[in-house]
């Protein structure tokens, strides 16, 4: 099941998504987390905390779920 992540800005970074979804406690933990876990963005491996995620991007985090980035402006 996909969980929607609603954003009000043009994009969100992967590190921000991890923090917003309470997968990590602080932004500083993102680098470590991405080194230790195999995360996919749009079905491609990704390990950059600054990776920009735009509406309709998907993020698969093993053990946490699949997330779909959506804009609050999409209606």
Image (tube, helix red, strand yellow):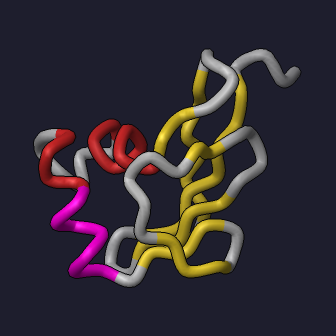
Q: Which image quadrant: the C terminus?
A: top right
Q: Quadrant of residue 41?
A: bottom right
Looking at the image, residue 73 sits to the left or right of residue 32; the answer is right
When the figure is inspected, residue 30 is found, relative to residue 35, above or below; the finding is above
When the figure is inspected, residue 58 is found, relative to residue 72, above or below; the finding is below
Q: Which residues are magenta?
A: 31-37
Q: Does the magenta stretch mainly form a helix, a strand or a loop?
A: helix
- Residue depicted at 39% across the width and 83% down the height: 38
Residue furthest toward the right?
75
- Residue depicted at 14% across the width and 53% down the height: 29
Q: Residue 42's x, y, as percent?
A: 70, 69
When the figure is inspected, residue 14 is found, relative to residue 47, above or below; the finding is above
Q: Residue 43's x, y, as percent?
A: 68, 78
Residue 11 magenta-highlighted: no
- Residue depicted at 45% across the width and 50% down the height: 14
Q: Quadrant of residue 16?
A: top left
Looking at the image, residue 49 sits to the left or right of residue 75; the answer is left
Looking at the image, residue 62 sits to the left or right of residue 72; the answer is left
Count the labels in the image. 0
Q: Residue 10's x, y, as percent?
A: 69, 23
- Residue depicted at 33% across the width and 79% down the height: 63
Q: Which image quadrant: the N terminus?
A: bottom right
Q: Residue 64's x, y, as percent?
A: 35, 69
């Amino acid at each position: 099941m996909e969980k929607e992540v609603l954003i009000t800005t043009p994009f969100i970074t992967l590190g921000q998504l991890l923090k917003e979804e309470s997968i990590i406690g602080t932004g500083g933990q993102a680098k470590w987390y991405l080194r230790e876990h195999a995360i996919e963005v749009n079905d491609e491996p990704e390990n950059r905390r600054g990776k920009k995620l735009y509406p309709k991007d998907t993020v698969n985090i093993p053990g946490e779920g699949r997330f779909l980035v959506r804009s609050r402006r999409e209606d």
